Image (cartoon, coloured by chain):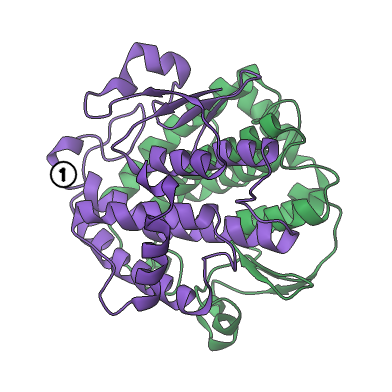
Chain colours: A green, B purple
Amino acid sequence: MLFYDCSTAPNPRRARMFIAEKGLEIETREISIAKGEQLSEAFRAVNPRATIPVLVTDEGTVLTENLGIAAYLEARFPEPPLMGRTPDEAGAVLMWNAIIEQQGGQPIAETLRNTHPAFKDRAIPGAENYAQIPELAQRGIDRVGAFFGLLETRLQDSAFLAGDDFSLADITAFVFVDFARVIKQRIPAENVATRAWFDGIKIRASARL
Amino acid sequence: MLFYDCSTAPNPRRARMFIAEKGLEIETREISIAKGEQLSEAFRAVNPRATIPVLVTDEGTVLTENLGIAAYLEARFPEPPLMGRTPDEAGAVLMWNAIIEQQGGQPIAETLRNTHPAFKDRAIPGAENYAQIPELAQRGIDRVGAFFGLLETRLQDSAFLAGDDFSLADITAFVFVDFARVIKQRIPAENVATRAWFDGIKIRASARL
């Protein structure tokens, strides 16, 4: 297997944490988004959509997108399970993962990419250029506030997002919550359940990579 | 099991097609988005996030989000497989599903919800209100053009999106391509591979529900 990573970006970090939680060591190549290497001819020969992470499997399948990589690794290396053991757990993990991507990952990315000069004409990841839309930035901040509320409500009832066990959904949420610092948003001090959950994940070996 | 559906909206249609492809008949309740029933106190007691589809499992788990519902049904009713048989296939299905959601579903929804008067202050599905941002509408049209190109490139090489077999990724793409009519976008006449793929799915019994 061959893993294309980027140490500064949240989406590759999700895949990196998933790989570490599985106890796998996979040959890795760093692609610098700061240097625009994802747009190079060499990398686009691997992934024409110019996004990271990418996992090339032993069978030669080129998998992009965190869910593609996770589904492959979970099926091939089932232990420890990160996508649920029972049908109900499998459903809950992908449900929470989708909620976190839409309600957390999307507004954080929209705020960053529609304001920061480094993302001028790069408002959407990938091979095509799109202009920034400044209104999306304030909407993103508002939505991140709602996202922190959603997390707190859930984590007051449940040790982890999808239930009693740490899962892919926690990796997704942890990485996005941590990344929210780039738009100056942090877990509100009064959200004690979320803070306890975050601190518990932060000390895992996979979170330090 | 109990399925909450809405006959006019694309996301519930994806779950409805998945259920039909599994050959399941599940007790169904219609929630009219036109009447705002998803925001009613009764429905929000089921799903506080006020989105459809929802599947309540026999074990009582309330699953929202298409991927949550699909992962549960695939694990509980494996035949026919709609999320891949091998690890590589499982990865390819969720990869393509994610690409289609981001590159197709998102721009179509952004164009519709940021222009149509019926979605005034409802630019994002769910319990919170968000104002329309007109710039997103034109960006959405541009992105749908790129999406049709992406589909054609893939379907020139592959019978279905994730490989040789019909899968969840085809359901997602078929529903979004069909729904693009609401923003007056259709498969370009010269995209013959996409048209053949679309016409082949359109005649499946699951597509007529």
Residue situated in front as seen by the camera: A21 or A60: A60
Location of the C terminus of chain A by quadrant is bottom right
Quadrant assignment, res A1: bottom right
Quadrant assignment, res B148: bottom left
Identify the residue shown where x is 53% and y is 61%.
Answer: B96
The local secondary structure at tag 1 comes to loop
The answer to whether A95 is drawn above or below residue A124 in the figure is above
- x and y, in percent, of residue B51 in the image: 40, 30
Residue receiving disc 1: B116
Residue situated in front as seen by the camera: A11 or A92: A92
Chain letter behind tag 1? B
A34 to the left or right of A29: left
- x and y, in percent, of residue A6 in the image: 64, 67
> Furthest residue to the left?
B117
Report if residue B183 is visible in the image: yes
Identify the residue shown where x is 69% and y is 33%.
Answer: A87
A82 to the left or right of B159: right
